Image (spheres, helix red, strand yellow):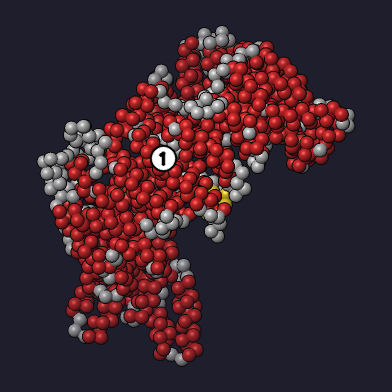
Amino acid sequence: MAEKLRDLSQPIDVTLLDATVAAFYGTGSKEERSAADQILRDLQNNPDMWLQVVHILQNSQNLNTKFFALQVLESVIKYRWNALPGEQRDGIKNYISDVIVQARMSISLSSNEVTFRQERLYVNKLNIILVQLLSEEIFDFSRGEMTQQKIKELKSSLNSEFRLIHELCLYVLSATQRPELIRATLATLHAFLSWIPVGFIFESPLLETLLKFFPVAGYRNLTLQCLTEVAALQFGDFYNVQYVKMYTIFMMQLQAILPPETIPDAYANGSSEEQAFIQNLALFFTSFFKNHMRILEITPENRAALLLGLEYLIGISYVDDTEVFKVCLDYWNVFVLELFEAHNQMEPAAAVSMMGLQAQMVPGIVDGTGTAVQQRRQLYSGPLSKLRMLMICRMAKPEEVLIVEDENGNIVRETMKDNDVLVQYKIMRETLIYLSHLDHEDTEQQMLKKLSKQLNGEDWSWNNLNTLCWAIGSISGSMVEEQENRFLVMVIRDLLNLCEITKGKDNKAVIASNIMYVVGQYPRFLRAHWKFLKTVVNKLFEFMHEMHPGVQDMACDTFLKIVQKCKRKFVTQQVGENEPFVSELLSNLATTIADLEPHQIHTFYESVGHMIQAESDNAKRDEYLKRLMSLPNQKWAEIIGQASQSIDILKNQDVIRSVLNILQTNTSAASSLGPHFFPQISLIFLDMLTVYRCYLLRLNGRMYSELVSSTIAEGGPFASRTSFVKLLRSVKRETLKLIETFVDKAEDLPHIGKQFVPPMMDPVLGDYARNVPDARESEVLSLFATIINKYKGEMLEDVPRIFEAVFQCTLEMITKNFEDYPEHRLKFFSLLRAIGTHCFQALIQLSSQQLKLVIDSINWAFRHTERNIAETGLSLLLEILKNFQASGFQNQFYKTYFLTIEQEIFAVLTDTFHKPGFKLHVLVLQHLFCVVDGLTEPLWDATSVPYQYTDNAMFVRDYTIKLLGTSFPNMTATEVTKFVDGLLSSKHDLPSFKNHIRDFLVQSKEFSAQDNKDLYAEEAAAQRERERQRMLAIPGLIAPSELQDEMLTNARQEQYSNQVVAFGGVDC
C-alpha cells in the first residue's frame, strides 16, 4: 500500500489516500496511525507531490484529504512558486478560482448545517491559498526586476484579473472573522495597490473597508501600509474629495489611538508591533503630504487637520530611531525647500510663480491683502518654529568635530568617520539654513534661549550642548553681517563663560570642542572683530596644552582653519598692539607647542606658514621664516654636528626619527609658504640630499640608501617591512616629498628647476635605478613628474636621463600583474604623461623599439582595472596622438599604431569593467576617425588586403566593420555597418558622436542588464556643477569656511549682503 502511494509516476490512488488519511485521524490502530503518519510525511516531502493536488481535489470525498492536498500546495507557493513554469502557475490559479466559485454555490444550496460548516471551512482555506497565490504574483512584479515597458504591458494584460482579485479581497474582508485570512488579504492588497486600476480604489468600498480595520490593533499596521500606498498615488485633482475624506477620517481615528504629545514615549516603551506602527505612520504622513498637502489648505477644517498631521510628524521626528528620523528628515527637507523657493522667487511688491507649483491663489487662504506665498508661510509659521527646534535638538555631528561620547558615556577622540552621520548632517544643515532664511529672528531666539538654559544648568547635558553648537555652526553665512555679528558676540561670550564656570575635565573638553567648532565656522565674523579673533586664538593655544583625547587635535585643526581665512589679520599690527600677532606668536613658539605631538606640530607649522605667506614685506617675511624654523634648524645642526664627530649616531633609531620629524616639519611649512620657503630649503637642500644617500657619511662602508637596498636584497621581501628599514625609507620618502612640495608650490621662480635638479640626478635617479624593486621609492616618479609639469620644456635635456633611470625597470615591476606596486603604477604613468605633454620632442627622439615600448605601456595602462591608472593612460594617449598629429611624423606614427590603438580602444569601450573611461574612449575614437582625413600615406598593408582602397577613410570603415562584426557575433552585418557609418558621419560633432556610441552600448547584450550611469558621467558632472551654482546663490548653503577666497572684495561683500537681505527680508 505504502509503495503504491509513494509512486507518483502515475495519478495517485485517491481512494487509498483517503483511507490513509482516515487512518491517521484515528479510525485505525496506533500502529496504523504511525504508519499513515510516515506515509503522509513522505508524500509531503516529495517535490513532485504538488502535481497530484488537482487530481486529489477533484476526486477525493474526504475533507481532511483535501486539506492535506492544500497544505502541499501551500508549501509549494511559499518556497517554490517562482521556480514553476508560467503555464503551470496560471493553471493552478484558474483551477483554485473555479473550485472556490463551485464551493460557494454548493454552500449556498446546502440545507445541512454540518455540511454547511464543513464546506465553509474548506472555502476559507481555498481563499487563503488564492490570496497567497496572488500575493506571490504581485510581489514578483514589485521586485524591480522588469523594465517599465514590461510592467506596463503586464498591467494592461492583467486588467481583467483585477476584478477577481478585488472582489475576492472585498469578499474576504467583509465575510470572514478569521484573523489569519484577514491579514493575508491585507498583505495582498498592500502588494498590488500601487498598480491597481484607480477605479477599484476610489469607486468601490475599498477605502471605507480599510478605514474600518484601522482602529483594530491586530490589523492596524497592515491597514496603514495599504493607506500609505494609496497616499503615494497621484491622479491630478480628480480624486481630491476622496483623499480629503480618507485623511479626515484617518486623523479622527488616530487621535483616539495615539495622542501626538505621547509619541516619543510610546515608541520608547512600546512593543515591536507598536514601534512598527509609528514607523508606518511616518511613511503615511510623508507620502500624503508630498502628494496631497495642497488640497488640505483650502478650508479651515482641513487646515486644522493638516496642522495636526504636521504636529504628529514632528512628534515622530523626535523618536529615538535613526531610520524613522531619516524618513521624516527627507520630507522636512522637501517641505522647507518648497516654501523657501517660493519665498525666494517673490518680487518685492508681489508674489510670482512658485518653483514646481502653479501660481494660483489658494482658495480660502488669500484674503486679498497678501500673496499666496506669504499666506502659506503664515499658515505654517507654527510648525516651522517647532521644526527649527527639532533641527537644533537633533543636529547631526559635523566632520570637523573630533571629540565624541562613546557607548560607555566617556568623552573620547573619534577614530573613524561615520559616513551616514555626515550625509545626515548635510541634509539637516541645508534644511536649517532654509528655515533660517524663512525667519532669522525665530532661529536666533530659539538658539540663544537654548544656550541660556545651558548656562543656568536647566538644560545642561553634553548632547544638548553639542547639537546646539553644531546647529549654530551650520547656519554660518545665512544671516546679514550685522545680525550675524550681534548673534556671534552673544554665543561666543556665553560659551567662554560656560567653559569658565563648568567643572570637570570631560565637561570642559566638550565645551572646548564646541567653542572650536563654532568659531571655525564664522571666519567673516572673526575677520571683522580682531579682539574676538585674538581671544579665540589664545583660547586655542590653551587647548593645545589640554591632554584630554582629541582636544589638541581639534585645537590645531581649528587654528589652521581660522588662519587660512584670516591670515592677513595676523601680520598686520592691530590698534592697541605693540607688534603684529605673528611676531608675538613666534616669540612664544616653544612654549605654545611644548605639549603637542609631532603630527600636531606639523599642522601648527603649516598654520604659521599661512600667516607668514600673507606678509608682503620681503625682509619681514624672511625674518619670520627664520624665527619659525629656528627650532628644527637647531636640532638639524645638532645632529649634523654629532654625526661629523661619530658616524654611529646615525644608527640610533631615535636620531632617525628626529631627522624624519624635521623633514616633515619643513614639508608642512613649505606647503603653506610656497615660493617664500626658498631661503629655508636653500639652507638645508644639499645636506638633505647627502642624508638621502648616506646620512652624511658611509655606515660600515655602505651608504644608508644602499643599506636599505642590500638589507632587502638579502632578507627578501619581508625585510622591507622591518621597523628599521621602514624608518630609513620614511626618511627617503619625506626628503622627496619636501622637494616635490616646494617645487609644486614655487610659482614665479623659474630658475629653481635648473638650480635643484642637477644635484638630484645621481643621488635620486641613480639610487632608484640601482635599487632592487622593493627598495625603489614611488615618490621619485611623482617628484620628477611634478618637476616636468612645473618647468615644462626647460627639462627637455634631462628627460633622456630620467627615462633611462626609471622607464625599463619600473615597467618590469608593474606589468607582471595588476596588483603589485600599486603606488608605482599611477605615478609612473603620471610621469609619462608629463613627458608626453611638455617634453614631447624627447619621445620623437626615441628609437622605434623604445617608442613601441611606450605605446605598449600606455595600452597596458588603459586596460588596467584601477580607474585612476586607466584614466591616466587614456589621457596620456590622447595627448600623444594630438602631438604626433602636429609633429610632421604623423604618417609614420599612425601607419604603425593606428589599427592597434583602435582595436585596443574598442576592446575597453565594449568591456563593462571600463565604463568609467567612456568619455576618454569617445575622445580617442573621435580623434582617430578625424585624423585619417589628413594622412597622406595609406594605413593598410598593400600585400595583405585583397584590393586597393581609394582613401584611408574607406579602409578604416571596412576594418572597423570587420573588427566589430567579430567582437559582436550576435549582431547582424547590417547593424554593425549602420553603427560604423553613423560614427563616420558624426565624427566632427562630438555630442552626436558620443550619443551614437552610447546608444550602441546600451542596446548591446553586455551593457543592457547593467547599471550604465558611468556612460552619463559628463551629464552627471554638469548637473553637480549646476547644483553648486544654485547653492552658491543662497547665502550659507556653502559655508563661508569652505569658500576658497580668504576675503571677499567690497563689491562682493555688498552683493553678498544684498542677497541675504533679499532672501531673509520677510519673516513669518
In the picture of the structure, the residue carrying the numbered disc 1 is: 489
The residue lying at 45 percent from left, 67 percent from top is 48
722 left or right of 532? right
862 vs 358, nearest the viewer: 358
300 vs 440, nearest the viewer: 440
463 vs 415, nearest the viewer: 463
Q: Amino acid at mark 1?
A: Val
Q: Is residue 116 in view?
A: yes
683 left or right of 651? left
Q: Identify the element where label 1 is drawn.
A: helix
Q: Is residue 155 in view?
A: no
The image position of residue 137, as x and y in percent, is 34, 58
- Relative to residue 101, is residue 589 depicted above or below? above
The residue lying at 47 percent from left, 23 percent from top is 923
Q: Residue furthest bottom?
A: 29
Q: Which quadrant: the C terminus?
A: top left
Q: Residues within 10 Å of mark 1 (few under 14, many from 20)?
A: few
